[in-house]
Image (tube, helix red, strand yellow):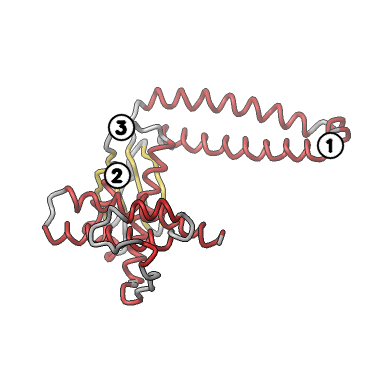
Amino acid sequence: MGEAARVLYEFIWGEFCDWYIELSKPRLYGKTSPRDRETAQHVLASVLKGTLELLHPFMPFITEEIWQHLPGRGLTIMRSPWPKPGRELEDEGAEKEMELLMDITKAIRHIRSEMNVPPGRKAEVLLAAPDEAVRALLNRDGVYVSVLAGAVLKVFPGLKTVPEQAAHAVTRGVEIFVPLKGLIDVDKETARLQKELALVEKDLVRVRGKLGNPGFLGKAPAGVVAKERAKEDELSQKQSAIGKRLAMLQGN
């Protein structure tokens, strides 16, 4: 039961809510055809119905309450048959395409978060995709990445020159560049990161001083020493991450 509940939770939050509901919004509220809108509505309703049926053994009262608000429902969810897998709906190609779009979205979001880009500000994003099929996918469905990552995408086979002061990431063979000049206050963000780096390095010196002290290593309980070693690893990783962000801001 525990494993089944975990898988359901990950699907509902990690795929249906975080991704499909958000991805469907341009089709529901944007300039789209009635057929596209109806398709999105049908998929949303169908997945919600099936999800409620799967959740019912774990959450009988809540699922019944939601069930009573569904259009075209049966009298009670308790009499609804257990969902059967629809093998005819499986599409490995579509799954791979979706995984690529999701990975690019995650990479852009990560850059925005690391570089402290204001949430409401659109970022220009340059995508270098040597693969023609990938470029076709990005030109066709890049709007979903734009919506979810707050980005304006420009797709190229490759870039002859790398933009200065640009954050950079690579995922699935696609290079991602986010020019930072004009997007954030580079000087202010550099100063903030330098201050943060100084604090991290100060803590790192202190922890390494402890770990380099034979008296501490000989007298401290093993659990305390292990905790300090873990702290050293964490601070070292943080130092490296901040250094990389500073290098991006400085155009190195």
In screen coordinates, is 154 left or right of 168? Answer: left
Q: Which x, y percent locates residue 202?
A: 64, 25
Mark closest to the chain's N terminus, 1 or 2 = 2
Residue shown at 62% from the left, 28% from the top = 201
Looking at the image, residue 114 lies above or below residue 42: above
Name the element at disc 1: loop
Residue shown at 31% from the left, 64% from the top = 131
Say the numbered circle drawn on residue 40. none
Q: Which x, y percent locates residue 38?
A: 17, 59
Q: Quadrant of the N terminus?
A: bottom right
Q: CA distance from mark 1 to mark 3?
A: 49 Å
Name the element at disc 2: strand
Q: Amino acid at mark 3?
A: Leu
Q: Amino acid at mark 2?
A: Val
Q: Which x, y percent locates residue 133?
A: 28, 66
Looking at the image, residue 232 lies above or below residue 70: above
Q: Amino acid at mark 1?
A: Pro
1 or 3: mark nearer the eye: 1
Q: Which residue is mark 3?
A: 183
Residue shown at 87% from the left, 30% from the top = 215
Residue shown at 20% from the left, 62% from the top = 39
Q: CA distance from mark 3 to mark 2?
A: 11 Å
In screen coordinates, is 101 left or right of 37? Answer: right
**Front residue of this view, candidates 108 and 39:** 39
Q: CA distance from mark 1 to mark 2?
A: 51 Å
Mark closest to the chain's N terminus, 3 or 2 = 2
Res 88 quadrant in image: bottom left
Name the element at disc 3: loop
Res 206 quadrant in image: top right
Q: Which residue is mark 2?
A: 125
